[in-house]
Amino acid sequence: MREVAIVGIGQTPVREHWDRSLKQLAVDSILSAMADAKVEKVDALYVGNMLSYELAGQENLGAVIADQAGLYDIEVSKIEAACASGAAALRAGIIAVAGGAQEVVVCCGVEKMTDFLTDTVSQGLATAADWEAETLHGVTFCGLNALLMQRYMYEYKVKHEDFAGFVVNAHQNGISNEMAMYRNPITFEQYNKAVEVTAPITLLDSCPICDGSASVVICPLERAKEFTDKPVKITGSSCAYERVAVAARKDILFFEGVYKSAQKAYQQAGRGPKDINIFEPHDAFTIITALSLEACGFAEKGKAVNLAREGKISLGGELPITTMGGLKSRGHPVGGTGIYQVIEVVQQLKGQAGKNQVKDCSVGMTQSIGGAGTVVVTHILEV
Amino acid sequence: MREVAIVGIGQTPVREHWDRSLKQLAVDSILSAMADAKVEKVDALYVGNMLSYELAGQENLGAVIADQAGLYDIEVSKIEAACASGAAALRAGIIAVAGGAQEVVVCCGVEKMTDFLTDTVSQGLATAADWEAETLHGVTFCGLNALLMQRYMYEYKVKHEDFAGFVVNAHQNGISNEMAMYRNPITFEQYNKAVEVTAPITLLDSCPICDGSASVVICPLERAKEFTDKPVKITGSSCAYERVAVAARKDILFFEGVYKSAQKAYQQAGRGPKDINIFEPHDAFTIITALSLEACGFAEKGKAVNLAREGKISLGGELPITTMGGLKSRGHPVGGTGIYQVIEVVQQLKGQAGKNQVKDCSVGMTQSIGGAGTVVVTHILEV
């Protein structure tokens, strides 16, 4: 299989975009990525999206968005993997380019969530859980993650305040990211006083509902120089999953899907946790960040919160995470997030991360999760 | 890229399955296809589905269905391309196997539509059209196809009764197919007396809403003999699309997406219309059958109805179509249909089509369409 490179990136700010439709947001990021790669023509469009059925009355998004973008004579596809949809669309594009089915491809993630009331959006997001075992009985994603966080705190004798570092770090990094939704710092005091949503999860453990789209242009590495002087290689790309219903899992405090997905990506790239210079985890809730760091091999079980406490996840630390704000501060337009993460790592690897630039950064990893740790897409990027 | 073969098939009857959930239907066909291929382990599952968000409260179907089927340690993906979702899932699987990302893969199409009232289902199906230009204004799919049929009849001086042959043929072929939803013959008289739905489309121009799932196991052709004595080669696989909004098209009576998709598949297979022994078109409405036959090169513009009138589409004719009942008689569980079509061609190519067996059948073509001719997936299969 061919090596694959990212040669163009494009993103909209993450906001409440009252004046842009789902289609317009997607087109904005697609055309921006194509302009960045200086391509006028691509061979295929892969779209990642989760909630357009409910929130835009629109399916068939591959064709709908290609049409709106004026991209004709191409192959189109829409991939859905809950909150990992954007990353899954990139993975589909990589498989096609690596295998020879396509040459130059745009992978776009998009979500428009703020036109509806929160309960509608929460119901929509809950379709990523197991309907029969979980959703039917009224559990939301916040509820499922609250159960995980409660158990984590009990099992490892960790306090709620121990998670604060993840949020403080994310918001600190989001300040300089013009694309971020929330560019205000959060103090430890604010975190500890935040209003509870579902105990023990508070408002500040949770990422926001928002609108946004991000796209990348990929091509065979051997052709990357046609489009850019600084291609970024995709050395690892994987998808794995574990039991959907949390109650069906052997150990609810070990994200097996995250573990398997990370291991596959490490193996492909010939890398291990120690080689990763920056990591963009799926920090939709602070407990997910902790469990992801552990299952990826960055911390022992029950110890991930120490990384935050000891400052190891900051821009100057051993393993900077959420370097541009993460899902918490940049925002989590669910189908878009997987590509936002990849773009941010690309910026870091190319030395284009501005005030948030991590020094000596040549290997980065992104991870998107759909469901409560269920389906996991991991990418390792290198220059 | 590697050649790819189908080595196992599985399908549920197309019915109103009051006693089986979406997940159960999918698992039924997956396990049946795996049993047919005598495989206990696969490397990936690609699921095609359109309406599970609305009709089952369930997204994340890749993981959800793999979990229910007891398939762990695999990659999962869900693809949505409106009514072509099943065929698009097969195409995603083919790309992965041909390119080397996967070895043995199950591609599953599934839809469960009959738990809800027809207006909910019609609204759901309408999300395949352009929301802003079409659906918002109240046009359903039946309405869009009625506009096409009306124009076709006006432009080519064709009468409504000229379409009867498509329906009579489909139902005649469905009688012997135990998997078919409607196994009753339809006479020309019945067709001509059928109740109007949206003029000029009548009930008997339209395929039924129903439940069902179909799956195939694919692998590299070079490994096919491990699983079956009679592999079926996939010699052509393509996806193309055209403008979503019907009013935006240059010529609404020429399905450009169908044309492009067919041309790509012909080119890959080194085949042309004359080489195709049987064709499974997307006969959701009789007008779609006519326009598809024309855009695929089987008939000149305005002349497809002649094929039916002259008996050329029957099992003994020059180009047998809907050989196991088609969408009209076998039924159209939308996300499942693309794989049902492929299974039926596999049965024909292997000489396992029973009373419906077409003689000297070695090259078959299937075509699935999402939207009113919008996104089109074509496969050419050969023995």
Image (tube, coloured by chain):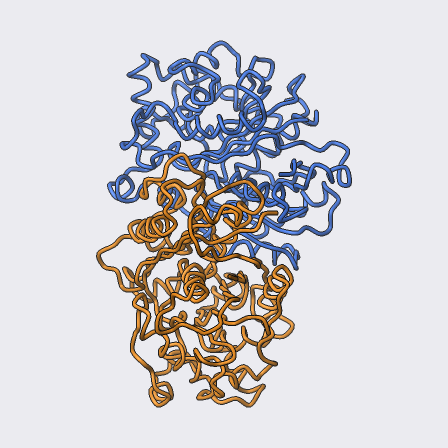
Chain colours: A orange, B blue
At 30% from the left edge and 53% from the top edge, which residue is drawn?
A25
Question: How many numbered marks, from 0 up?
Answer: 0
Q: Is residue A7 shown above or below A338?
A: above
- Quadrant hosting residue A156: bottom right
Q: Position of residue A84 (x, y in %)?
A: 48, 60
A24 or B253: which is nearer to us? A24
Q: Position of residue A224 (x, y in %)?
A: 48, 49
Report the side of B198 relative to A290 (left or right).
left
B127 or A307: which is nearer to us? A307
The reply to whether residue B172 is visible in this rendering is yes
At 41% from the left edge and 13% from the top edge, which residue is drawn?
B303
The reply to whether residue B21 is visible in this rendering is no
At 38% from the left edge and 44% from the top edge, which residue is drawn?
A39
At 44% from the left edge and 56% from the top edge, which residue is drawn?
A230
Q: Is residue B61 shown above or below B373?
A: below
For the view shown, which residue lies furthest in the left direction? A19
For the view shown, which residue lies furthest in the top direction? B310
Q: Position of residue B237 (x, y in %)?
A: 55, 34
Q: Position of residue B338 (x, y in %)?
A: 53, 36
Q: Is residue B219 shown above or below B263?
A: below
B59 or B100: which is nearer to us? B100
